[in-house]
Image (cartoon, helix red, strand yellow):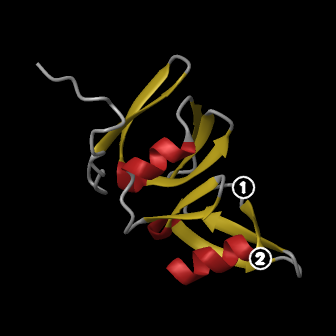
Amino acid sequence: MSVTHPVARAVERLEAEDLVLLREKSLSMVVKVGEIAAIEAHGDYTRIFLNEGKNLMMKKTLSLWESQLPTDFFVKVSRSLLVNTQSVAKIVRKNLLRWELQLQGAKEPIQLSNLESKRLRAAL
């Protein structure tokens, strides 16, 4: 009998229509992967931004999300931010060093550096 180490297994990437379970404290919700607008790292936690403007914190690392999400939709713009290119409403330059990323349905923009905005704009 052979036992496969969990890290040795190939991680199967999710597709935009696949469902994913999101949990924050007592709240659990199932959403399509394509409804995730962005994911921002906060240590071992991640803030999940959804297309309808909601966001929640979840105990799951950004690197784990990155290994599961479809690369044709999600681009890593920094060590702490994954963005669904289909959810970008606009990117606005605020000054020489700062940009604002407005996601569809989001109330608050996400601040980006020049390099982060360049990476995102290259992926769009």
The residue labelled by disc 2 is 114
Quarter of the rendering containing residue 16: bottom left
Residue 84 on image: x %, y %: 48, 62
**Residue 117, placed above or below residue 12:** below
Earlier-in-chain disc, 2 versus 1: 1
Residue located at (56% from left, 83% from top): 122
Badge 2 density bin: few <14, some 14–19, many ≥20, Cα 10 Å: some
Which amino acid is tagged 1?
A: Glu
Q: Answer yes or no: do the residues labelled 2 and 1 have beta carbons within 8 Å?
A: no
Q: SS class of the residue under badge 1?
A: loop
* Residue at 41%, 31% in the rendered image: 29
Q: Which residue is mark 1?
A: 108
Q: Is residue 105 visible?
A: no
Choose top left, top right, bottom left or bottom right for residue 79: bottom right
Q: Relative to 52, is 46 above or below?
A: above
Left or right side of 57 for 9:
left
Among all residues in the image, which is located at the extreme front?
A: 1
Local secondary structure at mark 2: helix
Residue 82, percent from left and from top: 56, 57
Residue drawn at x 41%, y 53% is 35
Q: Quadrant of residue 91?
A: bottom right
Is 4 on the left or on the right of 58, as rendered? left
